[in-house]
């Protein structure tokens, strides 16, 4: 009996490797401890509207300063005016910009995830119970799938938020450190420190 050898050749269709990538975005940020600093020792209530506004502002900051530039390759400067006050916008013309904004990084073609340790808020009230500022302690890690591999961003420190005349809040100052890594990521300044002093009437 003759033996017949049968070979099987598998041919790849050469399709788009990115077609099967998960291109979703997941953001998981939540509030942690809420504290009140006031000249009145009995003033211990953190206004719920203020805490919600602070979280919403930080989420918007992460979206416009990190997620969008990772997706598109650039920051939309017009959007920054909705997040930062005039003093902060001026500071973004310095080296601090590279610490606060994730622009010029390898473009994300796959999933982007944002996770953070619960954000601690401290509100400062004056003698008339007016809200002067909110300090937000952040520890946020971002992962983005680029064409060449995983890009990571780890931002820690504090943001200072102040109320506006229209009752909204904006970022006015910060003390931040950022670490970035991954293929195609070049070294940038990693620390930004700005202090704001607000006098509270006794």
Image (tube, grey):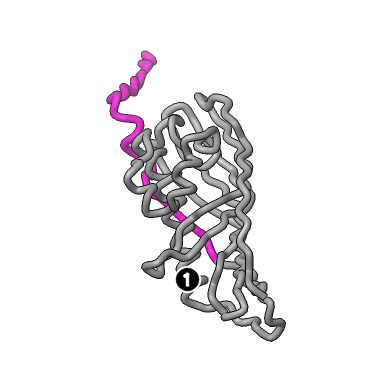
Q: Main secondary structure of the magenta part?
A: loop
Q: Residue furthest bottom?
A: 42
**Looking at the picture, how far across and down is residue 101, in whole percent?**
48, 40
Q: Which range is magenta? A: 1-30
24 or 76, which is in the foreground?
Answer: 76
Relative to 37, does residue 76 appear above or below in the rendering? above
| Relative depth, front residue between 111 and 58 | 58
Q: Residue at x 60, y 53 (%)?
A: 196
Q: In which quadrant of the rendered view does residue 34 lie?
A: bottom right
Q: Quadrant of the C terminus?
A: bottom right
Q: Secondary structure at mark 1?
A: helix
In the image, is residue 30 above or below residue 64? below
Q: Which residue bears the numbered disc 1?
A: 52
* Magenta segment includes 17: yes
| 54 left or right, relative to 168 | right
**Is disc 1 surrounded by few (<14), some (14 to 19) or many (20+) residues within 10 Å?**
few
In percent of width and height, residue 36 lies at 65, 74
Magenta-colored stretch includes residue 58: no
How many numbered callouts? 1
- Rendered location of residue 19, percent (x, y): 31, 36
Q: Residue at x 34, y 34 (%)?
A: 18
């Amino acid at each position: 009996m003759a033996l017949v050898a049968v070979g099987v050749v598998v041919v790849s269709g050469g399709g788009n490797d990115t077609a099967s990538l998960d291109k979703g975005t997941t953001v998981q940020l939540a509030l942690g401890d809420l504290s009140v600093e006031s000249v009145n020792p009995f003033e211990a209530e953190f206004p719920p509207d203020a805490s919600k506004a602070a979280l919403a502002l930080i989420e918007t900051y992460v979206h416009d300063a990190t997620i969008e530039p990772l997706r598109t390759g650039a920051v939309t400067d017009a959007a920054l005016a909705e997040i930062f006050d005039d003093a902060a916008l001026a500071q973004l013309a310095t080296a601090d910009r590279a610490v606060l904004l994730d622009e010029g990084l390898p473009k994300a073609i796959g999933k982007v995830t944002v996770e953070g340790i619960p954000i601690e808020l401290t509100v400062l009230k004056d003698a008339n119970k007016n809200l002067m500022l909110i300090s937000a302690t952040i520890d946020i890690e971002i992962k983005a799938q680029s064409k060449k591999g995983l890009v990571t961003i780890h931002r820690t420190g504090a943001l200072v938020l102040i109320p506006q005349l229209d009752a909204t809040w904006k970022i006015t100052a910060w003390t931040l450190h950022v670490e970035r890594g991954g293929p195609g990521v070049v070294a940038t300044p990693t620390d930004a420190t700005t202090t704001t002093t607000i006098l509270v009437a006794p």
